[in-house]
Image (cartoon, grey):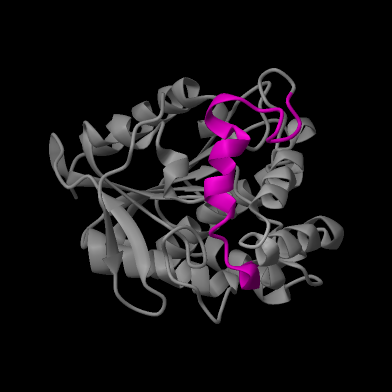
Amino acid sequence: MAKRLPRTRTLKGDPPLAHYDSVKAIDPSFTVLLIHASLARSEDWENIFPRLATRYRTVAYDLRGHGKSGRASDYSLRAFGADAVRMLRGIVKGPAVVIGHSLGALCAIAAAAQAPDLVTALVLEDPTLAYGKGWKPDQYMALRDALTKKVEDPKAFQRFVDRWPLASPGPRGERTYGESRGFYAAERMITYMRDIDPAFADSRIKPVDEDATAAIREWLAQVGCPVLVLAGEPRLGSNVDDAAEWTLKRSIKDLTVRRFPGTGHLLHGFRPEQYLENLEPFLRRLREAPVG
């Protein structure tokens, strides 16, 4: 059963970023920063956040144009990456392990590249290295239309979310949010998707974004900290295929890859216990590492 996050706070700036901070922990000197995927919000970590917060200071934030964060005029990948650095400098204010899912994983990579003094290590959950390709126009134009009409016809928005395909099949073979139960039930996903800025969808319905591709390549070359990659199976929707795994291995010196058989892109949502079983030894090793 997912638990509620702490009270929301706001980091001022352009745009304002809503965030959640456990503050108190057994070891407050060790901080974990969580960054969700596109079309989600910080509540997507509700089955992970409380478990981490018993040991570490745990912070999560809503991406620009998502959840309770402000809308923006710029939804480039570089802007998302800059927000991660803002959170580290403005809220965390010290070294952290940055954990990101999908788009959030790219933000984590950006933070490690641009603020290496504030990033102890990275945990990349199914990173979207092909982010520059954009989304399929037909599917995401439907999202754009639904977001525009959600106020005047909320039932139609609910039907839209019911039909929206899961990023990877559920544990019982579910293919849509309407078929899903539990953590990714449609009722929950409506609360995620209704607060998406339509302009974000606009930014993803376009041809290849060469700047995003260049940014990912540039950031990966600058990552010097330990990295744990958690990935599913490509045949079930994982972004980390052989080519992506080779790119990560070629770019990052201290890299560990852990695969989740029988799972695609949605790892922590569908497999929270397995997720934590892979995550905790990595965090423990970092805590026990000698200083200097």
Seen at 31% across and 42% down, the residue is 5
Front-lying residue, 117 or 275:
275
Q: Which of the two residues, 276 or 67, is positioned nearer the viewer here?
A: 67
Q: Which residues are magenta?
A: 174-200
x then y, percent, for residue 246 = 68, 46
Residue 176 x/y as whole percent = 74, 35
* Rendered location of residue 198, percent (x, y): 64, 68
Does 183 appear above or below 38?
above
Q: Is residue 219 above or below residue 193?
A: below
Front residue of 282/233: it is: 233
Q: Is residue 198 inside the magenta stretch? A: yes
Q: Please state, as top left, top right, bottom left or bottom right, where the N terminus lies in the image.
A: top left
Question: In this image, 177 relative to 222: left or right?
Answer: right
- Magenta span includes 18: no
Q: Does residue 115 show up?
A: no
Residue positioned 71% across, 67% down in the render: 204
Q: Residue furthest top?
A: 172
Q: Tell me what residue is drawn at x 66 percent, y 28 percent.
A: 180
Q: Is residue 7 visible?
A: yes
Quadrant in the rendering for residue 131: bottom right
- Please indicate whether residue 67 sits to the left or right of residue 260 in the image: left
Residue occupying the point 68% across, 26% down? 170
Question: In this orientation, which residue lies closer to the viewer: 238 or 144?
Answer: 144
Q: Residue lying farthest right?
A: 138
